[in-house]
Image (cartoon, rainbow, N blue to C red):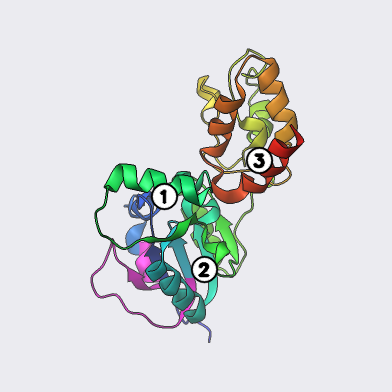
Amino acid sequence: MKGKKLKIGIYELTGCAGDALMILNCEKELPAIFQAVDIQSFLMAKSDNIDDELDVALVEGSVTTEKEVEELKDIRKRSKIVVALGLCATVGGIQARFQDPQKWQENFRQVYGETKMELPAVVSKPIDAYIKVDFYLPGCPISKEQFLNFFTRVVKGAPPESYPQPVCVSCKYKENDCLLKNGLFCLGPLTADGCGAVCPSHNLPCVGCWGPVQGGNWTSEFYLLQDKGFSREFIKKKMANFAGTKLSEFWKQFDRRD
C-alpha cells in the first residue's frame, strides 16, 4: 500500500556488535531513519522490540550456538528480505577462520577450561550456512556511508550496491603506488572494494576486512607472496583472518595439491 512504512528489524548474533554500533553512528540521520521506516526490533537502540512480520531483516554476527540457529530461522520465516550485515554474517568473521572442529574444541578448552556454558553449534558460520540470504553488506565493520547508501536504496525499492571488483581498482584510480610491488604484504587483489582503498591510500597494506572478492585468484596471490619471501603459514593465517569459511575448501584442495 502506497505510503506504508517498511517494517525493519536489526539483529545481532555472535560478534562485536560493531555493525549495529555503526548504524547508531549515523547520529544526524537517525531521526530521519526512524521516521522513514518502522523499526520493529533494534536491541541496541530501543527497548520496545517486537517479533513481528518484517519487510527487511538486517542480521549481524556469525552463528555460533544452537539457540542462534533457531533465532535465525525464525527471523528468516518472518522476513521478506534478509540482509547479512558485516563480515561475521557474510563469511563467518575472524572466529570462523579455521574450520577444524577438533582444533576448535582444543582452543575452546584453553580459553574456558571445563566451565559449563552453552556450547556452540559446531564452529562459527556465516548466516547463509543455515538460511537463504538475499543481500550481503560486507565490512568489518560496515561504514556509515555504506549503510546510508543501502538504506536509501531499500526505502526506494532498489537493490543494494554490490562490490564485484577488488581494492586494486580503487588504487589504480587514485594512482597509488602498488604496495605488493614494493615488497609489502597486501591483500588488495583478493578483497572486495567497498572502502575505496582507504588503507593503501595511506600507505597501509590491505588486510582484507571487506572479505573475499568474487573470482579472486588466491593461488596466484599465494605464490606471488611466497616469491616475495613470506612463509606459507604466515600467508595462510593472513588470508584466513577476514575470509571466514569461504576459503576452507580452497585450502583443502591447495594442501592436497602440494
The magenta stretch is: 32-56
Gap between marks 3 and 2, in whole Å? 40 Å
In this view, the mark in front (3 or 2): 3
Q: Tell me where residue 47 appears, x and y as whole percent.
A: 23, 70
Q: Nearer the viewer, residue 206 or 124?
A: 124
Count of numbered circles in the view: 3
Magenta span has 190? Answer: no
Q: Tell me where residue 182 appears, x and y as whole percent.
A: 63, 12
Q: Residue 251, labelled with which disc?
A: 3
Q: Amino acid at mark 2?
A: Val
Q: Tell me where residue 138 appears, x and y as whole percent.
A: 54, 50
Q: Nearer the viewer, residue 179 or 220?
A: 220
Q: Residue 143, labelled with which disc?
A: none
Picture quarter containing residue 176? top right
Mark 3, other Cα within 10 Å: few <14 / some 14–19 / many ≥20: some
Gap between marks 1 and 3, in whole Å? 20 Å
Q: Amino acid at mark 3?
A: Trp
Q: Residue at x 25, y 59 (%)?
A: 116
Mark 2 element type: helix
Mark 2, other Cα within 10 Å: few <14 / some 14–19 / many ≥20: some
Dot 3 and dot 2 residues touching (CB under 8 Å): no
Q: Which residue of the protein is positioned furthest toward the bottom in this rendering? A: 1
Mark 3 element type: helix
Mark 1 element type: helix
In this view, the mark in front (1 or 3): 1
